[in-house]
Amino acid sequence: MIRGINLLIVGLTQYFTAIFLLRNGDGSAVFLDVNFLLLVSSTVIITSAGYLINDYYDIKIDFVNRPDRVIVGKTLKRRWIIISHTFLNILGIAIGFWLSTTIGLINFSAAFLLWLYSNQLKRLPLIGNLAIALLTGTTLFLVGQYFQERVYLVFCYAVFGAFITLIREIIKDMEDMKGDEKFGCRTLPIVIGTLRTKKVISLIAVFFGLTVFLLMSHINLILPITLSIVLIFLIFALLQADTKKGYHQLSTFCKWIMLAGIVSMIWI
């Protein structure tokens, strides 16, 4: 339920940011920094709480979209999900305030936004997608806030993470249209249709590529050029996709783009 692979990606993203963007590949000091471990732990804990509350609110929808993955109400009782969600949020927020007031407030805001997303925002067109994109960028912003160094470079990668997450979230809405529409969700593909949604994603992808090029071309040309090629391929594949399986494959492809972006920190 807590999406172990996704949590691993979150933790790796923060450690890669600290080691390769802020410490020039010297990981010894980062790995020995107990407070940074606590920062990463608090991020992972709050993210896992977000996954729990999302599954709690999406029981009926998941029975349509992903019946083989439903756990709430079958394997685990709903009250245990709420108890676990509350405990994890309190723990993650407390760790944040232990580190600093600013990090504590960011963790509190992230926990609240994840609850609001699961309760309301994900059922609205685009707003929920933007919320998750913002939270993805925040995971990198936290690292910059902790070290107070090379803020611009961290910001560039935060923008990268936010954009690719936004694209992936909208594609996932196309994949989940059947269940979402049945239970009254008003996601973007339901409101404007799949064809127009593909056009919106394509425009976001073009703006994404241009933004990264403008932000990073003076730092490293290889990343924005490679990203532009990958995004062109993504747009063509998206325009051809018309099945749930096809949208799922594109969603997975976006996750691989995210991983490639993390790995690129080694050479930046």
Image (spheres, rainbow, N blue to C red):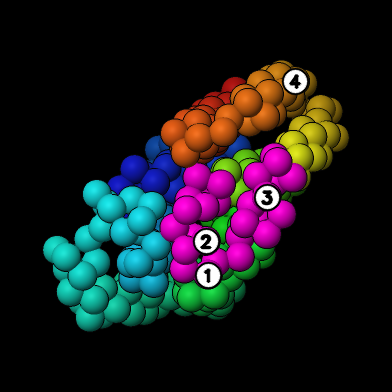
Report the side of 36 relative to 117 (left or right).
Answer: left
Instruction: State yes or no: residue 214 in magenta.
Output: no
Bounds of the magenta segment = 172-198
Marks 3 and 4, how far apart in space? Answer: 31 Å
Q: Is residue 176 left or right of residue 199?
A: left
User: What whole-number distance in Å separates the C-alpha atoms at marks 1 and 4?
Assistant: 41 Å
Q: Read off the residue under disc 1.
A: 184
Q: Earlier in the sequence, mark 4 or mark 2?
A: 2
Mark 3 = which residue? 193
Furthest residue toward front = 182
Q: Under tag 3, what secondary structure?
A: loop
Disc on the earlier residue, 1 or 4: 1
- Residue toward you, 8 or 247: 247
Question: Which circle, 3 or 4, is nearer the viewer?
Answer: 3
Q: Is the residue 160 above or below the residue 223 in the image?
A: below
**What quarter of the picture does the N terminus occupy?**
bottom left
Q: Main secondary structure of the magenta part?
A: helix
Disc 4 residue type (three-letter): Ile
Whether label 3 touches label 4, CB < 8 Å:
no
The span from disc 1 to disc 2 (Cα, nearest Å) is 5 Å
- Disc 1 marks a residue whose amino acid type is Gly
Residue 12, by quadrant, is: top left
Write down the residue under mark 2: 181
Badge 2: residue crowd in 10 Å (few <14, some 14–19, many ≥20): some
Instruction: Give the residue at x 83% y 28%.
Output: 218
